[in-house]
Image (tube, grey):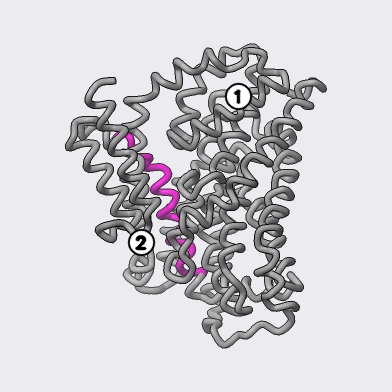
Amino acid sequence: MDSKQVLAIAIFSLVYLIILAGENSPRKLDRPAAGLLGGVLMVLCGVLNRSQALNAIDFGTLTLLLGMMIVTVPATASGLLDRMAIRLTERSGNARGLLLMVCLAAGCLSALFVNDTICLIMTPMILAAARSERLPAEPYLLALATSANVGSLMTITGNPQNMLIGQSSGWMWSAFAIRMIPVGIVCLIINWAVLDRIYSRQLKRATATIQSPDRSWERPYNRKLARRTLIVMAGLLIAFLFGAPMDLAAITAGAALLVWANKPPAETFAAVDWSLLVFFAGLFIVVGGVTKMESGVITHLLPMINHHTASAEGLTDFSIFSVIGSNLFSNVPFVMILRGWVSHMRHAPLLWLMLAASSTLAGNLTLVGSVANLIVAQRANAECPLSFWKFIKVGVLTTPLTVLASVIMLWLYGRLGWA
């Protein structure tokens, strides 16, 4: 291992430790500062040159995030999200019913939109619902993050790594969805059961019956702005369904609302979470540096995987390898590295499905395992901080259980010839 490899691992470890420490970091560094610091160090220490650092940043993802942030500003300012929060609580019946509703809504919507988008939209809505009913926000925020990840495995457009798999595997959107929707539904039920079990005492102590939510916190409802926001969001959904580039569609929707809302754009830009964008830009550079230095490690480990990958044992080995790799290197770079290897395997179609499931479900293991998790944590930080340890107490249960369920179902697909 040369000096640059050591530096890359050291910088990655530093960033990870700062994120892990949260508000308890020695110099009060938060997640955006950790990402920025790590990105700068990767360049200053020579792990990446300036051109490589620039190329490591996924501007498509940043554009998608920016566009969706702009879209959510009028959705919040118009009172639309507040009304949706009230409708959600009214239809849930009780605190446990609300948890189930959040799991199902986040999972199903993430199959159509990118899971990051759903977390951007639903986080303020869940916080509003928790304020209204004096409910603990933590279980619902964790339900949002984990269920958005689970639901996103159901379609090729559900998350970035699935999009890479769709481009490399030859799976059509509809054929992929037909096979993965049942897997996603089963995993959503497992995820809800884990959350319900962990937080059963808190939910029982919460409001027993939700009937007449307190509306004192509700913003004045601007019907015209809410209607315009819904029209733009409906157009955005249609664009996604018809395969338009998601970053272009999102930023176009944001630009359209800036014009149509007839509000000072400065108000909208002030509400954008720029620190989150800085964090992701820095993190892309950090992951790019580690991937550049350490991708050979993954390549050397591949021969150790059971080559009888269509067997239950082979799929289990492959999924464990994928979960570990996705958490060490981030799921998108990990999928980028593996796609050249998977495409030459005898049972490649089945392995593509397994890679999509395991790399996505791996995101639920830790707080930093998925961009969706970090979006929820960052946007909810002021009202309900989600620490690394709060997240992992759910992740250590839901991740192995859902991965096991996906292995069993995909093994059955292989036996039945459906893959």
Disc ID at residue 23: 2
- Local crowd size for mark 1, using a 10 Å CA cut-off: few (<14), some (14–19), many (≥20): many
Q: Determine whether, in the image, residue 166 is placed left or right of residue 259.
A: right
Q: In the rendered image, which quarter is residue 402 located in? A: top right
Amino acid type of the residue tagged 1 in the rendering? Phe
Of the residues tagged 2 and 1, which is closer to the observer? Answer: 2
Q: Determine whether, in the image, residue 377 is placed left or right of residue 395.
A: left
Task: Where is residue 270? Give x, y as percent.
Answer: 33, 68
- Residue located 63% across and 18% down the image: 348
Residue 264 falls inside the magenta stretch? no
Vertical arrangement, residue 91 with respect to residue 215, above or below: above
User: What is the span of residues highlighted in magenta in the rendered image?
Assistant: 55-75
Q: Determine whether, in the image, residue 204 is placed left or right of residue 351.
A: right
Disc ID at residue 318: 1
Camera-side residue of 271 and 229: 271
Amino acid type of the residue tagged 2 in the rendering? Glu
Task: Where is residue 204? Give x, y as percent.
Answer: 71, 71
Vertical arrangement, residue 283 with respect to residue 53, above or below: below
